[in-house]
Amino acid sequence: MEPHLSDLALDRLALGGATTAGGHLATCDACRGRLESFMGARLQLLSQPRYLELRDALTKLPPPRPRWPAIAFGVALAASMLVAVWGVTRRADDTRLKGGLGLQIALDSGTQPSAFRAGETVALHLSAAGHAYALVMGVDGQGNVQQLWPPRAAASGPAPHGDGARLDPSFRVTPGDMQLWSFFSDSPISSADAARAMVAAVDRTRTLGASALDAIPEPIPGEAGRAQARLRVEAGP
């Protein structure tokens, strides 16, 4: 059995980097779940007002003189920021992140097979964990990005209430796997911003020789959380 990915590898992926671990992520639910937690924690950190204040304050500081006391002070400040941020991230993880953000793919009958057949009709099911808006994007193995829900809208739509709430309309499965991403927010997210983030992620991943299905988009302006699901399609005869 292939070993699970290390925290270091998952942290690199959460930061938008790519590794050779794409094949493992495609088949390991445990590692995909851990990666979603890493990414969610990072999003919570980036949205904290205190983090933004510290970042802005540091960018306004004059360049430090190359003396050991200044270097030591910089290390101590970075360490204190890390401790403070870790505490904020853990509290957020214990509340909203574990509150049930999710994306599922199911047949109209409600069943969830391990792989679907081309031509079948499927529906998306979301768990928004109290967030007001949602946007679902998809990318296929060739790197083609498309907006799945809300269809043909300029921004994210009102998120349904409840766990595993169904989204309409349903859609028909076409040949080839697809990676789906749902982005949650408390105000509408621009569909164009989401598409640009997806395309950029595909480009980064391809430069490293990985599959477009393993691309991980950078945080989108206004995003508060995300979930992902792989639509696996049986190969034709």
Image (spheres, rainbow, N blue to C red):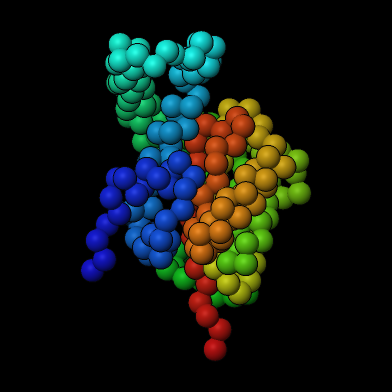
82 is higher (above) or lower (below) than 24: above
30 is higher (above) or lower (below) than 175: above
Nearest the viewer among 207 and 184 is 207
Q: Residue at x 42, y 68 (%)?
A: 114
Q: Residue at x 66, y 61 (%)?
A: 144
136 is higher (above) or lower (below) than 61: below
How far across and how far down the image is residue 49, in percent?
Answer: 49, 16
Q: Quadrant of the C terminus?
A: bottom right
Judge left or right: residue 66 versus residue 61.
Answer: left
Decide if residue 122 is in sight here: no
Which quadrant holds residue 45? top left
188 is higher (above) or lower (below) than 35: above
Judge left or right: residue 101 versus residue 186.
Answer: left
Decide if residue 39 is in sight here: yes
Nearest the viewer among 216 and 64 is 64
Q: Residue at x 52, y 80 (%)?
A: 235
- Extreme residue toward the front, this view: 66
Judge left or right: residue 44 versus residue 146.
Answer: left
Q: Quadrant of the N terminus?
A: bottom left
Nearest the viewer among 83 and 87 is 83
How far across and how far down the image is residue 187, in percent?
Answer: 63, 28
How far across and how far down the image is residue 118, in percent?
Answer: 59, 75
Nearest the viewer among 103 and 165 is 103
Judge left or right: residue 178 versus residue 148.
Answer: left
How far across and how far down the image is residue 12, in percent?
Answer: 40, 45
What is the count of numbered marks? 0
